[in-house]
Structure formats: structure tokens, C-alpha cells
Amino acid sequence: MNPLRLRAAARVVKSGGLVAYPTEAVYGLGCDPRDEEAARRLLALKRRPPRKGLILIAADFAQLAPFLQPLTSADRARLTATWPGPYTWLIPARPDTPRWLRGRHDTLAVRVTAHPLAAALCRACGHPLVSTSANFSGRPPARSALAVRRQLGTAMDYLLPGPTGGSAQPTEIRDLRTGRRVRGG
């Protein structure tokens, strides 16, 4: 992990930029989740409809808590059993959680990542990151820095290179309220 590149990526995020970085299975494309302009730029770049919502990744649960409704102890235990790790959960969002993050949903997709570089970037930024695959909607996700460059070119502001976590599939998504699997697994 190159500390200079990590700090540079965090500066770009803090200044409203878009950063590509490795995650558990593919390269992610992210920004500051509280920056509406950056999030809208990310959605436009990916050609992703805002109604779908976005995923947030974090280094720990404390970074996600400001966006989520309070959890029961049983819900916390369920999350703790899977985090950090390649499990994304749909959790009821606070009413003031921005619409550009949750889309048309009353939940927010969140994950405490086990990927060391992605988690380090969240720590360097001091907050969670939007994390959507670094590709155009409908195209195969990028699994290398070169694939990100080929697909997104200079449309992103910074590319933080590194290996992905090696997972063959994108992270599983489950609904915390029902336990229902929404994607993967």
C-alpha cells in the first residue's frame, strides 16, 4: 500500500472528485457520499439511473451510523457476524439520508469492507465512500487498473491501483429486515 497514493486519493475525494479503487471483487468508483454534485457526476458517468441508489463502504460501522436508523442488538449481531467482509446489507436509512444515495428506497446499501486498501481509503477520508463498480452500466465490471482506464479513461479524477480481493462475484446483498438475498450468494 503506497501511502502517498492513498493520501492523494483521499485529497481527490475530499475536493469533490471521483476515485477508482480495488474492492473485494472488482474496482469500485467512489466519491464523498455527502457531496451531491460528486454523486450526480458519478451516476452520470456510469449512466446509472439515480432511482437505483448507491452502495456505501466504510472502514467500520461508526462511519455508516450517521446514515442509518438505529439498530436493535439482534441486527447489530447479524451485521457483526459478516463484517468486515464481502457482505452488503440493505438497512433502513435515516429520513435525512440523501435521496441521491438511497434512490427510491427507504433503505441504504452498506458494507464494512474487508479489502485493506478500500478500508484504508475510507479511514484516510474520515468517512464512508460511495462504492459502485467502475464501469458503465451494463458493461462488465473492471477487475484491474488497466480495465478501469480502458473503460473510464480520464472521466475519473484518480485511480488508486492495487489488487482486488479475488472474489469471483460482486458482494452478496441482503435485506437486514427480512434476511432475503437480493443479489449474489
Image (cartoon, grey):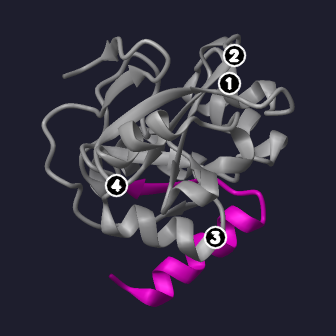
- On residue 45, which mark appears? none
Sequence-first tag of 3 and 1: 1
Q: CA distance from mark 4 to mark 2?
A: 24 Å
Q: Bin the neighbour count of mark 4 within 10 Å (Cα to Cα): few under 14, some 14-19, many 20 and up.
A: some
Q: Are marks 1 and 2 in contact (CB under 8 Å)?
A: yes
Q: Are marks 4 and 2 in contact (CB under 8 Å)?
A: no
Magenta includes 85?
no
Q: Residue at x 55, y 28 (%)?
A: 46
Residue type at tag 1: Arg
Sequence-first tag of 2 and 3: 2
User: For the residues carrying marks 1 and 2, which lies nearer the camera in this image?
Assistant: 2
Identify residue for label 3.
125
User: For the residues carrying marks 1 and 4, which lies nearer the camera in this image?
Assistant: 4
- On residue 102, which mark appears? 1
Q: Residue at x 32, y 82 (%)?
A: 1
Q: Bin the neighbour count of mark 1 within 10 Å (Cα to Cα): few under 14, some 14-19, many 20 and up.
A: many
Q: Look at the numbered disc 1 and give the secondary structure of its residue.
A: helix
Q: CA distance from mark 3 to mark 4?
A: 18 Å
Identify residue for label 2.
106
Q: CA distance from mark 1 to mark 4?
A: 22 Å
Give the image location of residue 142, x and y in percent.
30, 40
Residue type at tag 4: Pro
Q: Residue at x 49, y 89 (%)?
A: 4
